[in-house]
Amino acid sequence: MASQERSRPQNPSRSRMPADDSPSSAPGSEPVAATNGNGAPAPQPAESRIDAPAAGSDRKPAPLEARRAQFMIASRQNPGLQPLSADLIAQQVRDLPDVEYIKTVDPPRLLGLQSNDSGSLNSVIVARMTFEKARLLQAQAANRLLVERDPPLTFTLAPGPSDIAVGNPGVIVPHAEGFSTTIEVRGDGAPLAGADVYVFGSMWPVQAITDESGRAEINVVGESPETIRALYVKPKVDYWSYWLPRPQLVPGGISTAEVKPLGTFLKDFPDRQPLGWGERAMGLDQVPPSYDGAGVKIAIIDSGAAQGSHRNLRHTGPGLSIVGPDKQAWTVDTIGHGSHCAGIIGGGPAGGSGVRGFAPAAEIHICRIFPGGRFTDLIAALDYCVENGIDVVNMSLGGGEPSRIIEERLVRAKEMGVACIVAAGNSGGPVQFPASTPHVLAVAAIGKWGEFPADSYHALQALDGFESRDGYFPAKFSCFGPEIDVCAPGVAIVSSLPADGFAAWDGTSMATPHVTGLAALVFAHHPDFKGAFQARDARRVERLFQILKESTIPLQLGGAERVGAGLPFAPKALGLGSRPSTSASVGAAAGEAPLSAESLEALRKLLNILSRPPAADAGDAPVGPAPSPLQPAGARSIFEEPWSNGDVMRGRAHIGAGSDVGRAAERPADPRPALPDPQIWDALRRAGVI
């Protein structure tokens, strides 16, 4: 049973409040012209549709004003004091002028032994109001109430080149009158519709989407062809991205960009089902097929899953849509983010086509909170996980101020034996909440040279100055700090997208499902969880985190703040072995024999004339997004209203006293052999040798 939500009718004498502070649709709404999991147009709830006013309608202009923010209100836990009644708080909120009561989220209903101490969680009241009103409420309540922002959640999908820094809008001066041009995108020699096309100049990026003829008209304001810095093409499915610095655009002309199918780097894909480079890096190809996660419950809190249409996701479910009126709409994934994560975790069936996940036999629950998800929707999803006995939760999300209310839910989930694996974030700065709390396992992202085309945007994701001897690099977008527990592959990760396609994405969103999938295998097959750690409690979760950390391969990629304890290695985590094999290290695909040492050396000498693409000139530096610097405490975006939810705990996942987990300095050096130059691997793959 999911968390109970109670809504109250609006006061009829009160005018309807302005729209909430979400940058996207309100909870429950879908983007216009969205598609469901089968690729067909998704039905739009009546309250989410925006109808254009009829021609000639008598509309009066209204002054622009800031949207009201959404807040969470809950009784604070004070020793010796009885918590305030949720009904009393809700009634007082409804009686406040210029405050809109939204709903009450009650704590989960627990049964049997889990019901002990069930009163430690309080109901959460959700309301919209101004920041001034929220501060007044907080001051009047003294220490009896928690009043916190209920901000929109965001994906931890890498932002990509759309985050290239732009100038100060107050001082930007146009460089030219502007021009128009047309970009034609082709794949396999045919026009490619639905591809995102970005043109980056010296001021603002311009975006367009290709039509059925594969063409997108670009209207650039204040620029000339000489001031254009880069062109970026991102197909929706089945093709690699394309990045071209200093494109030669012709005003009024048509320029063609040819994108490569995913099969150019994944031999015979998707007809053949190879393990992804991330799965091989973590040693999944050395794990017996019988280790498939059967008997474990995984929850993916995300945008849904294309269960009805995708070949690799038909076994997912049950699920629940937290947002929107249709609770069964978890099979609707208008964004694709949840489907991509689900393919990494449990794509199947093994031995078929498409992608294969870590735990294809696990029971995968889908908690849909995107688009429109907020902290309160995350609360409802976590409560669902506790009520349904979920073992491990994938949270490729984050955002907003740290929240004591969310932290209390995470603590309760851990106490109930639910392990939360959380993406660190993609701002390139400090670890984001909730990955920053010690109650979860925080995952950073790494990439590997030779696993993507040199002209794709993935090639710009490496953090300069750091690279291991076998081609691994820290992702420049990945958040970092002392809270990082482990790292995992998060660059050029190929997985499932609606309706039945595939795409290579970047982000800590993609790294986290690798660790979630391995965690499911550990719960299912490690002997500790059939004996001493079988009981559903916090010790069980701490033991899981300890095993994952102790299994890691240390990586010298900028220290523990970048990679934590290192890259988890599946055979060691499952008690099957401690040293990676040569085939896993060099990246041989599943079912393929690795090259002999003699052959490899001969090919290295033969192809030694190859070198990496020349470094860009100093004047070319702006073509890629620069890593965001660490912000000092209190620094905020100009788009944010000053607000603090108060202090919450920060740090690596707590794993109990006496453990030596995470002492990377005491571990032996990486036992894997050094690999050839990544450019050589690129050539070998293109030649069909590997």
Image (cartoon, rainbow, N blue to C red):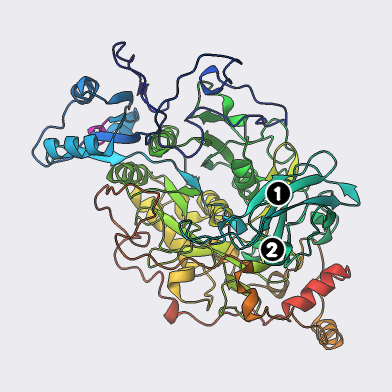
Q: Residue at x 37, y 48 (%)?
A: 640
Residue receiving disc 1: 219
x and y, in percent, of residue 540 in the image = 39, 51
Judging from the image, what secondary structure is the residue with disc 2 in?
A: strand
Q: Residues within 10 Å of mark 2 (few under 14, many from 20)?
A: many
How far apart in space, not on screen, are marks 2 and 1 (Cα)? Answer: 15 Å
Identify which amino acid the numbered label 1 is placed on. Answer: Asn
**Over which residues does the magenta segment extend?**
116-123
Q: Quadrant of residue 265?
A: bottom right
- Residue 286 appearing in the image: no
- Label the magenta part by its dominant secondary structure: loop
Q: Residue at x 62, y 62 (%)?
A: 175
Q: Which mark is residue 283?
A: none
x and y, in percent, of residue 625 in the image = 57, 65
Residue in front for this viewpoint, 397 or 203: 203
x and y, in percent, of residue 686 in the image = 85, 68
- Residue 269 appearing in the image: yes
Residue in front for this viewpoint, 67 or 560: 67
Judging from the image, what secondary structure is the residue with disc 1 in?
A: strand
Answer left or right for 544 relative to 212.
left
Observer-side mark, 2 or 1, equals: 1
Q: Residue at x 43, y 81 (%)?
A: 665
Q: Which mark is residue 230?
A: 2
Q: Residues within 10 Å of mark 1 (few under 14, many from 20)?
A: some
Identify which amino acid the numbered label 2 is placed on. Answer: Ala
| For marks 2 and 1 on the same chain, the one whose residue lies earlier in the sequence | 1
